[in-house]
Amino acid sequence: MEKQEFLKRYLTDRRGTYCSKWDGLEEKFGESDLVGMWIADMEFQTCDGITEALMERVKHGIYGYSFVPEDYYRVFSDWMERRYHLPIPREWVRFSTGCVTGIAWMIHAFTEPGDSCMILTPVYYPFHNVVTNNHRNLVTVPLDYDGHGYFTMNYEAIEAAIVEHQVKMLIQCSPHNPAGRVWTEEELDRVLSICEKHHVLVVSDEIHQDLVIGDHPFVPAAAVSGGRYRDMVVTLNSASKTFNLATLIHSHILISNEELRKTYDAFAAGLNRTEVSLMGMLAAKAGYETGEDWLEGLLAVVKDNYAYVKETLNRELPRLTVCAMEGTYLALLDLRAYVDPEQVEEFVQGRCRLGVDYGEWFGAEYRGFIRVNLATDPAYVEQAVNHLIQGVKALKTI
Ligand SMILES: Cc1ncc(COP(=O)(O)O)c(C=O)c1O
């Protein structure tokens, strides 16, 4: 679908719907008159196929206990095969009520209190909390930052930390939020081979898999090098970022290794309840069946929004770094050349009137970065960029 048609059909005002992004500004930032550029959901209605599937169920009016039909597994596997050459056998698939919940369950199923779990920072902040809140030892290894907006993995540091802390689990973010990287197969091969060497289980959060705008494809960890590492990987993914379904709380846990599956299933048997979300399941199925054209339209919007941010800020504020965004719809901006990192919040919220995610939420050393959500109306993107330009110009530091 063309970008203009997508915007015309799906761009929607969300105010007054209890949405965190706008209606939650006051609670999050203490002010409600900010341009909402934070959190990771979209200003767009989901695709028609999903809305129709949900409407049909709403009309039926019964939300009782349900099961996942065989069709679901086929439709999901077809999506994974069509897009990533990774058909998913039915027996690999388990469900959770969100990818972060999935991470928590993996931590409980496969590690003990006090075990070390590693994350590569800056990374989505619940990755930090889910480890510490579950009383595991959090090991953070910074990504390498080249000073020009590009993050890479530091393999030596990763291996050294694994050895030093006897790391049991790497919680990987792929594509990476907020670094914006879509890891190449070669990069994944290197990190996975280190984990293989040291018997580290990899939990790969691939929730952003379908949101790729760069020039190389997303490769699932389970497909790297022809599937060589798949038995040491648990993959978490869902249709929730792809089709804007976060609160329908329906995600996948994919486990190819039979032993790991048994361990997980034994753990899951002790959980109070692991029903699937009926509406989440119906929505994901309809998305995988009918949503590809919608997704093309979304990606066209995100790609153009990113190009606009990059071109405009590069031109107007040449020392502000717009980090690479090969995937996700979350762009990281490094403001440190213009604004004292200690004053970024005062500058961005106080002066520029923006509600954003701050770099230090993702890792203490990233104070001075902000993350902006580009799955939104181009008019908001323009407004946010203009506010930043005017704000910096008013500082008279250029
Ligand atoms: C990498 C990553 N994982 C998980 C989530 C949240 O997923 P869920 O709502 O399914 O827990 C997000 C949301 O931004 C994310 O960026």
Image (tube, helix red, strand yellow):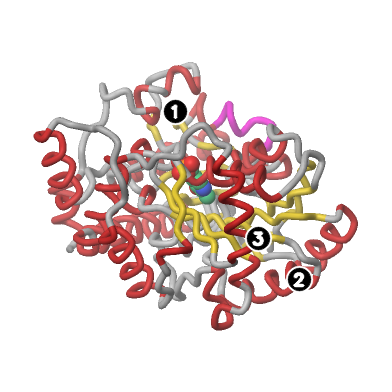
Please tell me which of labels 1 and 2 falls first in the chain.
2
The residues tagged by marks 3 and 2 sit, at their Cα atoms, a distance apart of 11 Å
Q: Residue at x 82, y 59 (%)?
A: 162
Q: Residues within 10 Å of mark 1 (few under 14, many from 20)?
A: many
Q: Which residue is under mark 2?
A: 194
Residue flagged by tag 2: what amino acid is it? Ile
Marks 1 and 3: which is nearer the front? 3
User: Regarding mark 2 in the picture, which secondary structure is present there?
Assistant: helix
Q: Nearer the viewer, residue 16 or 72?
A: 72
Query: Dot 3, crowdedness within 10 Å: few (<14), some or many (≥20)?
Result: many
Left or right: residue 210 compared with residue 115: left
Amino acid of disc 1 = Arg
Question: Viewed as shown, does residue 341 lie left or right of 294?
Answer: right
Q: Is-magenta flag for residue 120? A: no
Measuring from the top left, give residue 34's x and y in whole percent. Answer: 40, 26
Q: Does the magenta portion include 342?
A: yes
Closest to the observer: 143 or 310?
A: 143
Q: Nearer the viewer, residue 349 or 120?
A: 120
The answer to whether mark 3 and mark 2 are in CB contact below 8 A is no
Disc 1 designates what residue? 353
Classify mark 1: helix, strand or loop: loop
Pointers 1 and 2 in contact (C-beta within 8 Å): no
Q: Is residue 168 left or right of residue 77?
A: right
**Between marks 1 and 2, how big is the CA–CA gap?**
44 Å
Q: Amino acid at mark 3?
A: Val
Q: What residue span does the magenta drawing correspond to?
A: 340-347
Q: Main secondary structure of the magenta part?
A: helix
**In percent of the image, x 20 and y 51: which residue is there?**
47
For the point 62% across and 72% down, the residue is 188
Question: Label 3 belongs to which residue?
Answer: 202
